[in-house]
Amino acid sequence: MAFGFSLFALCVAFSAFVTAQDLSITDALKGHAELSNLTYYLTKSQDFVTWLGSRENITLLAPNNQAFKLLAGTADIANVEVDQDGLEALLKYHLLNGTYSTFGSGEYESIPSLLEQPDFTNVTGGQVVVAKASATSNTTRFYSGLKERSFTVGSAIQFKSGIIHVIDNVLTLPQTFTDTAEDRLFLVAEPFADAQIAFPDSAVTKTLDELSDITVFLPMNHSVREVGNLIEKMNRKDFDRMIAYHTLDQRLVIEPEAPPAGTYKTLEGSDVTIFQANGHVFVNSARIVSSPDWLFTGGVIYIIDGVLNPDNRTVDQNAIQDSQIAYTGASYTEEFEFPAPSQSRGSANNNGSGTGSGSDDQTSESKSSGGLSKGAKIGIAVAAAVVGLVLIGALVAFLFMRRRRVSSKGHQQLGGLTRPEYPMSEFTPSQKDLTSDAAAPGSSRY
C-alpha cells in the first residue's frame, strides 16, 4: 500500500516535471501570481512575444511584483505609460544568454545578456550581468548598472527553453562611463570623461563614453590628491595620455582571489602588469580595491588605490606591500585644478562624433577641494539618460535610474526587507578607509 502510494507520488512529480519542460516562457510565468506584473510587460508587444518565443537556451531573471512596484512607485502599473523601446531593452537585459540552473559559489560570473542594441550597449556579445552565489545559502546576488543589486527569491522555475530565477529588484541598465563615475562622486570622473584618448599610431581620438569593450582603472580621491601638485602642472595632452594608460582595450574580469596575472596593453600603447601580492591584487604599483561588478555601457571599472604613471612601469612584485606612489616629487595636495579639457563635452571630436552630454565650461567645480562634480551635485537619485531615447512616463524614468530608499541608518528598504547599503563615505574614494588597510598619507608613502 505504502509502495503504491510512493509510486503514484513519483509519477505525479514526473508528470509535473514533463509539463514544466513543455511550457513556453510566457505560460510558465502565468502560473506564478507573484510574476503577474512581469507577464503584463512581456506581453505588451506581440512582436516581442514572438521574438522571445524563438529564443533557446536562455535564463530569465524575473523581477517579482514587489520589484516592479518599487520601480514604478505604484502597484497600479497598468496605468503607467511606458516607452516600448526602452521597456524591451530593459527586459532583454534580464535575459541571460545560456541556461543557468545555478551560479558559481563565492566567485563572480560575468554573463552576457540578450541586450545588444547599439543604443544601449558597447559590449560585444551583449551587455553583461554579474552573478555571485552565496557560499552559505541558496541565494544568488546579481549586479547590474550603477552597482544595483538584486537577490534571488525562492526556487528556480523550468520552462521549455531554459530556466527562470525570481529576483527581488529590477536590474538597472548600465549607464555611460560619465554617469557611472559621477554617480559615486569621483574627483576624476569629469576629467576622465573629458579626455580625448588618442589611439596609438592614429590621429583618431575618442572619449571613454564612446569606446567599446574596455577596462578603466579609476583612482580613488585620496590617491589623486597624493599626486595633485603634479597633475596641476600637466598639460592636457599629458593628462589625457595618463588617462589612456588607465584604460585597457579589453573588458577584463579581475577576480580578487584569482586575478589574470600578466601584462596587458593599454590605449596609451604601453603595458600594465597585473599580479597578486600579500593577499591583494595590483595593477603596477596601485592596489585594486574593487570587484568586477562596476559595470558601464562600454565595459567595467575598477577602483585603484594609486595613480598609474606611463613613464614609471617598473614594479618589484616581491617587495611590494601596499600601493606605492609612482610619481617622483609628488606631495599630498588637498586643493588643485585639473588641466582644462582640450575639447568640451558635447562638441565634436577628431573623428566627427559627439562626446556625449555635459557642460562646455571648466569651472571651479573641477577642483579637488572636496566640492562635488556637476554630475554629483544633482544627487544619486538623478536619472542617467540613455543615448538616443526619450524616456516617456513615470515608469521609464525609473527604468534608467537607481531607485533607493535609504533610512537614517544607511539601510536600503526593498520589498519590506532591510539590506545594508554602503555608507556614502565608503563609496566616496577620498575616504582612506574605503578598504580596511589602505595606506594613509604619511612619510612611509613618500
Image: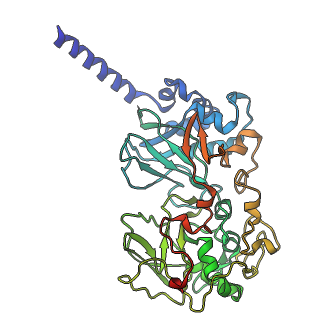
Task: Reply above or below: 316 against 176.
Answer: below
> x, y percentage for residue 355?
72, 69
Report the side of 6 relative to 127 (left or right).
left
Task: Reply above or below: 349 against 398.
Answer: below
Q: In this orientation, does residue 55 appear?
A: no
> x, y percentage for residue 339?
73, 82
Report the side of 170 relative to 106 (left or right).
right
Q: How many marks?
A: 0
**Quick one: 112 or 336, which is closer to the camera?**
336
Which residue, as the protein is rendered here, is positioned at the far top? 1
**Residue found at x 76% / y 71%:** 345
> x, y percentage for residue 159?
42, 32
**Quadrant assignment for the C terminus:** bottom right
> x, y percentage for residue 245?
56, 80
Which residue, as the protein is rendered here, is positioned at the far front? 443
Q: Name which quarter of the figure residue 4 lies in.
A: top left
**Residue found at x 57% / y 46%:** 171
Q: In this orientation, does residue 125 appear?
A: yes
Task: Reply above or below: 293 against 219.
Answer: above
Q: Name which quarter of the figure residue 174 lies in.
A: bottom right
**Residue found at x 49% / y 23%:** 31
**Quick one: 134 or 112, which is closer to the camera?**
134
Task: Reply above or below: 63 against 390.
Answer: above
Q: Name which quarter of the figure residue 227 lies in.
A: bottom right
**Quadrant assignment for the N terminus:** top left
**Quick one: 340 or 45, which is closer to the camera?**
340
**Quick one: 433 or 305, which is closer to the camera?**
433
Please name the colour scheme applied to the rendered image. rainbow
Report the side of 114 relative to 187 (left or right).
left
